[in-house]
Amino acid sequence: MFCQTYIIRFSMRKLSYPGRSNVLAQNGMVATSNPLSSIEAINVLKKGGNAIDAAIAASAVQAVVCPSATGIGGDCFAIISMNGKKPIAVNGSGIAPKKANLQFYKDNKIKHIGLTSPHSVTIPGAVHAWCSMHKKFGRIDFKEVLSGAENFARNGFPIHEVEAIAWKENETKLKKNHNSKRLFLNKNLSYSFGEVFKNVPLANTLSAISKNKIKGFYQSEITKDMVRTLNKLGGLHTEEDFYNQKTLFSETITNLYRGLKIHQCPLNSPGLVVLMMMAMTEKLNIKKYHPSSFERYHLQAEISKICFEVKETIFGDPDFNNINVKDFLNKEFINSLCAKINKKKVYSSKKSYVTSHPETIYLSVVDKDLNSVSFINSICHGFGSGITSNKTGILFQNRGVNFRLEDDHPNSIDSNKRPLHTIIPGLITNKNNETLYSYGVMGGQYQPIGQSHLLQNILDYNLSVQEGLDLPRAFALNGLLNVENSLDDKIVKKLKNIGHKITINKNSIGGGQCIKIDRKNGVLIGGSDPRKDGMAIGY
């Protein structure tokens, strides 16, 4: 039987249990997945930079100190909310090379894009987005914004715990590429916890970008070196492809949840999936079940599979597909999705299977003027493609693995097309466009349901931002239900008994950060996921 209705109010965490306190401040707040990144963002705010300057600075530092998850060879998305104004979505995802059309793969009998293939490398979009965001909204000089990242690359930084684990897990991948082996391995072994790592070629590249901005990366000797590196391995990339990379600014896509407005980036971000999941959550009235209950985790798993079925069969780059967002949020469509859910049985669909399950970093910044940035940056899988450029220290993403090599599929690869992405920043405002929460969740394909899980924790169960991040997670993907070790054994047993194929995640599922703007008290409240190395910090 499903549980009775629960009314839950948490005013503070139970101090007898392990956990973190929420971080409070009044002048600025940063939450990232690496302490060095958080501290640099605070430094930028104290120097007079705004939330945009600080977010770019933090992302740039993480591009250096978290090479397993992000880098300037990758992509980013952001939601920028200048206090009181309508939030803006930023799409910094990269395009496929012009020559990379489906016919090429057919002619060359390539049936899938390998994780370490040069064909997995889409044009990096992050640097273009950083420069474009700074030009529109930044307050301090761009050299100052990137100075912290350049410093860590040139002079070194200690490897943190979670990063060290990822480094070890990708040791074999890094050995496959001469440049990566030379730069990212120490005597043919991964760098370990506490060791100091430097990337001087990347420091020089960051210096050039800080001076020449977009041209420094997309129309320069750096561009030539990247193209030569990829071409030597069989890549189809050209300097023209880099020149053709653009950052897209647009309105966010939104939907109401309990009177609040959830903001997401449009496709090719999977933000629409979050809005669908939250609409289903509201329709199914999940808030009536206890936050740590079998019923809640079962319903979340079913919502994931059903929404992924839509995502993996219908969604793709909107420049190549005619997709009306409203069609997927209207009452009739949401009702049809909910009708597929049985409270006592497991929904099964091979159509929901994904091409890959990567990683990322997420960060959030709010400044003293209550401008906020929800920001996510990634090189896709751990250490991306494993391919490092010859001279620039740039490790390339492998976001191209998210494409499909199928005729007439909305996410099939094509010239200058953007792949269906996994990374999504989130933002919540009231009806007056005043930001209340800037948040995001890491963990590849987990992100849509992870955001849904976090929002339920905060909005439905009245958990604090830190408690909402801490709560155990489960994730249905490719026929399995991944659960964290911390999930109650009784819940796991019940899930297994009704047909879920359970696998216990050896580490953890995803990560996340969240900042709440308490406008009544004039306080910023930050939380950072203990599953990662990072921290929230304010001043």
Image: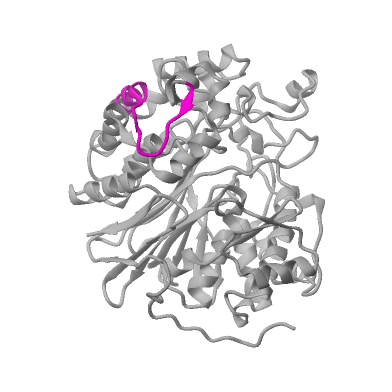
Q: In this view, does 418 lie above or below 176?
A: below
Q: Which residue is drawn at 26% across and 37% down?
A: 148
Q: Position of residue 485 (x, y in %)?
A: 59, 60
233 falls in the magenta region: no
Q: How many marks?
A: 0
Query: In this view of the protein, can residue 29 be seen by the observer?
Result: no
Q: Position of residue 80 (x, y in %)?
A: 40, 53
Q: Residue at the left extreme? A: 47
Q: Nearer the viewer, residue 519 or 62?
A: 62
411 relative position to 393: left or right: right
Query: In this view of the protein, can residue 42 be seen by the observer?
Result: yes
Give the quarter of the image for residue 436.
bottom left
Q: Where, quadrant-wise, is the N terminus in this rendering? A: bottom right
168 relative position to 288: left or right: left
Q: Is residue 141 above or below residue 227?
A: below
Q: Is residue 107 above or below residue 163?
A: above
199 falls in the magenta region: yes
- What colouring method underlies this structural image? one colour
Q: Which residue is drawn at 18% across and 47% down?
A: 47
Q: Which of 249 and 13 is in front in this view?
A: 13
Give the quarter of the image for residue 370.
bottom left
Q: Position of residue 108 (x, y in %)?
A: 77, 18
454 relative position to 99: left or right: left
Q: Position of residue 426 (x, y in %)?
A: 48, 58
Q: Residue at x 59, y 59 (%)?
A: 484
Q: Where, quadrant-wise, is the C terminus in this rendering? A: bottom left
Q: Which stretch did the figure color magenta?
A: 188-209
